[in-house]
Structures are given as structure tokens and as C-alpha cells.
Image: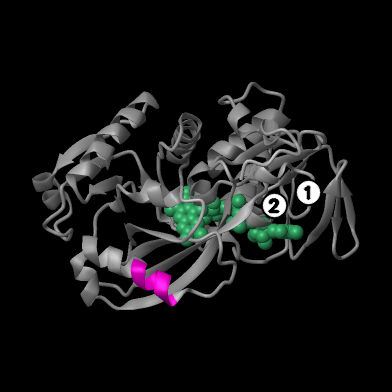
Amino acid sequence: MGAGIVGAAIAEALAGTDRSVLVLDRSRGFTGATGRGMGHLVALDGSPPQLELCRLSLDLWRRKKWREAVQWNPAGTLWVAESNEDLDVARAKKAALAAGGVDSDLVTAAELRRLEPLLAEDLAGGLLVPSDAIVYPPAAACQLLEDAAQKGAKIDLGATVTQVGGGRVRLARGEDFFSRHVVIAAGWESSHLVQDLARGLRVLPKKGELGITWRSPLHVRHQLVELGYMRSTHASSGDSVAFNAQPRPDGQTLIGSTRSLSDSTRRVDPKRFARMMERAVRFLPFLSRQSLVRCWSGFRPATADHLPLIGPHPRDPTLLFATGHEGLGITQSLGTARLIADHIGGRSLAMDWTPFLPGRIPEGSDHE
Ligand SMILES: Cc1cc2nc3c(=O)[nH]c(=O)nc-3n(C[C@H](O)[C@H](O)[C@H](O)COP(=O)(O)OP(=O)(O)OC[C@H]3O[C@@H](n4cnc5c(N)ncnc54)[C@H](O)[C@@H]3O)c2cc1C
């Protein structure tokens, strides 16, 4: 259930095995987060299990043969320090990444200017993670679905699921399907059909806004992210913005991003968006002279403890969750698919998924 990047990756991982695979999605395009995100494939060190899933996923991304079709760009991430305090954050990040097996290099202020001449001159330095990359998310999801279909998966778009449980899936158009496993990969709407999860494990829509410039000969070389980004991503109340900029292959610059748990409208909020752009201009002054051609919003599927839900429902083993990746769903899609495919195929898991299991919090409890 769900043909965003997570459902697409799971279909591709399962197709061609001894299972028959059916992908159901209400929409006919990538109308969920996959069509509205940024496509930064990033090793994030919010917690050891989060980093391990990123690393597994990045390894799987690098093994894929497709490059041009998904606009693969092995640019790496340049984390930018605004102040000396941020340099302490950079050093701590370097240590956390190293503990998870990811190499990175501290960068002085002078090196930062050499690596990214368009950055503001007063920045303190940064941290370069060369193994991170960029893809165009809808193209990657499309490629995964095409590969799944070639290996025999059936893809049924325009199929709204209204009920799941006990191995049965009911569609709005009146059909029922029966299966040993039903994977819920419906993004921020994943818990709508499963009401009895502990409240703390519900998937919530965390809104994000992005803007993109027109083509320009001036563009950045790496995915740029401010080191204050983690403070913004983990804010569980209120709105926040953090600077994030991505080079697109045609000379455009994709600029992010905002976060809000309290705004569930699709409308781009002008005040929050303006704050995001001010932040972007603070780091990349050239942006003040560029034209913005489009802005939009999307909903990240968020959980209260910032970890995805991957694995069986605590009381219905036919229902498998693969959701709640928040701002890491593009990155972690392939690792998630690998874990689900290992489970269904009866193989030992590629990594310990205990921290992601939907039963991690006792029912009835509430850790929001
Ligand atoms: C602004 C923004 C920036 C982001 N940047 C990044 C980034 O740089 N890197 C990164 O790794 N991640 C990023 N993300 C997060 C990433 O986009 C998401 O985590 C990921 O796309 C989630 O994919 P998904 O397949 O779980 O959900 P979705 O893409 O939302 O797909 C869910 C699908 O389920 C379908 N569905 C829902 N309910 C039903 C139903 N009842 N019946 C049938 N179908 C149903 C929907 O139609 C939809 O197609 C960003 C997100 C946003 C919003």
C-alpha cells in the first residue's frame, strides 16, 4: 500500500523472488512526499540506529547501476559552520559519523571558501562528508517501479485502500485482496487505517517548504546544510527553518527548508518561507540576485521519536509497517526495503531492526 519511494523500493526488492507483488496507490503520480522532497542522500547521525539505516541504504544506493535516469550526483555534503560554536558541533558530528563507519573531513574557513566560493565570507568552517549523494526522488521512485514491473510486480494506480488487517486489503472500488503480508508504506497517512497503535507511534504530517531558482551560471557544488540543522529537525513543537541548498543538474538551486507540525494546509506560508529565504541568503548571498521560479510544500511522515516504523504490527503479523522516515525517506528507502524483504523472505536481517519495530512502545502509552 503506497507507491512513493518506500513502497516502490519494497516492490523492487520483493519482485522476482518467489512472492507475487501487487503495489496499490490512490494517486497516479508521486503526489506524496516523494514528489515534493529534496533527494539528498545523507548519512545523518541523529542516533546510532538512524545512522546505521542511512549507511546500509547509502551502500545500496551506490550499488544501483542507474545514474542519469535518476540524476545521480555524488556531490557529498558540506555541513557549514556559522560560528565557532558550530565548529564544536562539526567535531562531534565527525566523531559520531566515524563511530558509524562514515568518513568525513573537518574544513577550515579558508578551505570552505575554496570548496564553495559562493558561500558568505564570514563563515567559520565546516565538515565535508564525501560519500553522500543526490538523486531526483520522483525519477528514482519511477525507476524502482519500472524495475519491479519488469521483474513481474503488478502496479495498480488509482486504487484507494479503505481497510487493512488480517491479511485482507479492501479497496474503495469494492475489491478485496488477500495476502500473507500487507506492507503499509502510505507516508504520513500510514496510521489512518490502523487506529490502535500507541499514540506515540502514530505517523504525523510534518510540513516542509522548498523553493527553486531559475537556471544560472552561478551554482553551488555540494549539498550545503547548516550545522544548526539538527536543532531544527528535532524541534517537536513550533515552526523552524534551517538552511539547505542543492545544486540541480541544469544550473538551478533547490533551497530548503521549513518544518511545521502545526500547519496541515498545502499552502506555502509566506512568513515561514521568507524566514527560510533570509537564512539561505545569509549563507549564499548570491541568491538575493536570483529569481525564484517555484515554491511548494510537502508532508514528511514523522514519528514522535524521530525513528521510522519498520516491521510487523504488534498484534497482526500480516501487517508490516514501512513508514515514518520523516526527512530521510528518500535516503532510507532502500535499506527499509531490504529489511522488509529479508523478513518476508525468512533471511537474517541486514541490520538489527529492534529500534524501528512498531511494538517498541507499549500500547496505551503516549510519549508525545
Ligand atoms: C520538503 C521536504 C524535503 C525532503 N527532503 C528529503 C531529503 O533531502 N532526503 C530524504 O531522504 N528525504 C527527504 N524528505 C523526506 C522524503 O521525501 C519522505 O520521507 C519520503 O518521500 C516518504 O516516502 P513514502 O513512500 O513513505 O511516502 P509518500 O511519498 O508520501 O508516498 C505515500 C503514498 O501512499 C499513497 N497512499 C496514502 N494513503 C493511501 C490509501 N489509503 N490508499 C492507497 N494509497 C495511499 C499516497 O498516494 C502516496 O503515493 C523530504 C520531504 C519533504 C516534504
C-alpha distance separating marks 1 and 2: 8 Å
Amino acid of disc 2: Ser
Give the residue number, with chain letter if any, for mark 2.
Answer: 190
Point out which mark residue 127 bears. none
Q: Quadrant of the C terminus?
A: top right
For image coordinates 16% across by 52% down, the residue present is: 123
Give the residue number, with chain letter if any, for mark 1.
Answer: 194
Q: Which residues are magenta?
A: 270-275
Whether residue 36 is visible here, answered yes or no, is yes
Residue 220 to residue 10: above or below? below
Whether residue 219 is visible here, answered yes or no, is no
Choose top left, top right, bottom left or bottom right for residue 51: top left
For image coordinates 49% across by 35% down, the residue present is: 50
Circle 2 SS class = loop
Residue 37 lies, in percent from the top left, at 48, 59
Residue 49 lies, in percent from the top left, at 50, 31
Quadrant in which ligand 1 is drawn: bottom right
